[in-house]
Amino acid sequence: MTYCAIDFGTSNSAVAISTAAGMKLVPLEGAHLTMPTAVFYCTDRDDLPPGAEPAPAQTEPPLPRVFGRAAVQAYMDGYGGRLMRSMKSILGSPLVEQTTEVGEGYGVPYLDIITTYLRHVREHAQVASGQALTQVVLGRPVYFVDEDPERDAQAEASLRAAAQAVGFESIHFQFEPIAAAFDYEQQVQQEQRVLVADIGGGTSDFSVVRVGPERMKRLDRRDDILSHHGIHIAGTDFDRHVSLNSVMPVLGYGAFGPSVGGAEPRPVPSRVYFDLSTWHLINTVYQPARVAELKSMAGFYGNPVHHTRLMRVIHDRLGHNLISRAEQAKIDVATTGLATLDLGLVERGLNASLKHDEAAKALEADLHRIVDSARETVQRAGLKPQDIDALYFTGGSTGLGLLTDQLEAAFPEAKAVRGDRLASVATGLGLHAQRLFQG
Ligand SMILES: Nc1ncnc2c1ncn2[C@@H]1O[C@H](COP(=O)(O)OP(=O)(O)OP(=O)(O)O)[C@@H](O)[C@H]1O
Ligand SMILES: [Mg+2]
C-alpha cells in the first residue's frame, strides 16, 4: 500500500501505515511510536551530536540535523546549533513567510523546518513499509487560527505545500478530534454519542460523533459527525502561564526600573518574557539585533541582577531549557501538588517553585475557555450535555486532572473514557486513510 497517515502535532508526531495486521504506528525513534516535533540544526561540524544526519541533497541550509528526542538531547547537552520546536504553531501566522537564523550565518524559512521534519518522518514510514508512500492523510486541528477562516485556510495550504515538497502526491486532511473518535469506535460495543476532547500542545479540539459497531462499517460518515469545534489554547499555553508565574519573575518580569528624579519607577519592558515563554518564539530572542537591543536596556532595571540573569539566558540560549522546566513543573504539580524548578543554570543556587493553587490560578482562564469550547461543540450538534453518552479524552494535556475534572463536571452523565493520550489521533487518521485509499 502506498498510503500513510501522519499526526503532525505541535509537541509530538506519529505515523500510521498499512500492514497485514491493519493500520499500525511506525517506530519513529528506536522503538518509540511517537516522536517530539523537534529539529536541531548542527552548526559545529567538528563536534556533532549522536544521531546527526547530513542535510539531504539540494536542501538548505547545508547543515547536519537531528530529530525528535535526540534533537532535544543535543540542545540540552550543549552541542553547537539551534533547536526548533512547536513548528506547527507558525502555520497561519506571519512567521510562516519569514526566515529564522540557525547560526553560522545560515537562515531557514520557518516552513522549511516543517518540510524537513515531514521528510524525516516519511522516510521512516517508507523504511517500515518497504515502499514509496505517495498518499497521505494529514491530521489538522479544527482551527489552526481561531476566528479567521482566511488565515486558517492559508495554514492548511502551507502544510499541504510542505507535504507536497517531500513527495506526497495525494494529500487529504482530517480533523484530529474526528480521527480520535474513529479510534475510540474500535472499542465500542453499542451505538453511542461521544464527545471527543483532544487536548494537545497547541490546540484543544472537540467533536461529537455517533459511533458504534454497525456505524463503523459505513464508508460515508458525514451523518455521524454531528459537530466539531476547538480553540487555539492548550499545553504550550499552560507552559507559558507557568513560566510567567514562576520562572520569568527571577529574570525581572513584573519588576520595576530605577526611580529617576523622584518619578514613579516604570515597569520593566515585558515582551522578551512573553517570547521566552512561548515555545515557537524563543529563537526570535536570539537574533543579533534583538540581543543588542536587550543588552542596551540595562538602565530599565531597578535591580541589575535581573538584567544580568536575563542576558545570561540569552547568551547561553537557555530559553528551551527554561520552558521545559516550566512544562515539567506543570506536570509535577498535577501529581504531587508542588513543583520545584532548579534554575542553577541561570545562577548558581537559584530555584523557583510552583504550588498547586498558583498553578490553578495561572491556568484558570484558559481552562474555562477550553470547557466553554467543549460546551459549544455539543450545542452546535443541537444537543444538551445530558445527550452525551461518553467523554473520550486524548492528547497529552488530558494528563492534567484540573482540566479533566472540569470537563467531566460539565457533562456529568457522560462516561469518561481515557484513550491512548499520544497515539489515538494517529491511529484514527490511519483508519480514515484505509477507508479513503483502499477503495
Ligand atoms: N502528564 C501530563 N500532564 C499534563 N500535561 C501533559 C502531561 N503529559 C504531557 N502533557 C502535555 O501534553 C502536551 C502534548 O500533548 P500532545 O502530544 O497530545 O500534543 P500534540 O498532538 O503535539 O499537539 P496538537 O494536537 O495541539 O498539535 C504538551 O503540552 C505536554 O506538556
Ligand atoms: Mg495532537
Image (cartoon, helix red, strand yellow):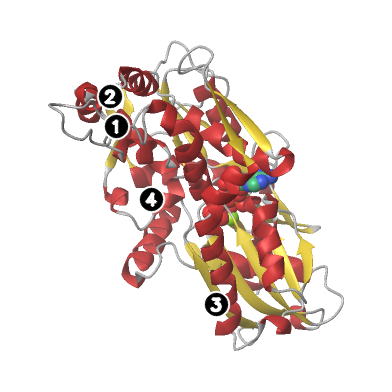
* Of marks 1 and 4, the one in the foreground: 1
Ligand 2 sits in which quadrant? bottom right
Q: Amino acid at mark 3?
A: Glu
* Mark 1: few/some/many CA within 10 Å (<14, 14-19, 20+): some
Question: Residue 173: percent from the left, percent from the top?
Answer: 51, 67
Residue beneath the point at 58% across and 64% down: 176
Pointers 3 and 4 in contact (CB under 8 A)?
A: no
Residue 256: numbered disc: 1
Q: Is residue 165 left or right of 231 when viewed as pictured?
A: left
Pointers 1 and 2 in contact (CB under 8 A)?
A: yes
* Of marks 1 and 3, the one in the foreground: 1
Q: In terms of sequence position, does the residue under pointer 1 or pointer 4 come before the other? A: 4
Question: Residue 82: percent from the left, percent from the top?
Answer: 41, 27
Residue beneath the point at 75% across and 78% down: 216
Question: Residue 380: percent from the left, percent from the top?
Answer: 55, 83
Q: In terms of sequence position, does the residue under pointer 1 or pointer 3 come before the other? A: 1
Q: Is mark 2 within 8 Å of ligand 1?
A: no
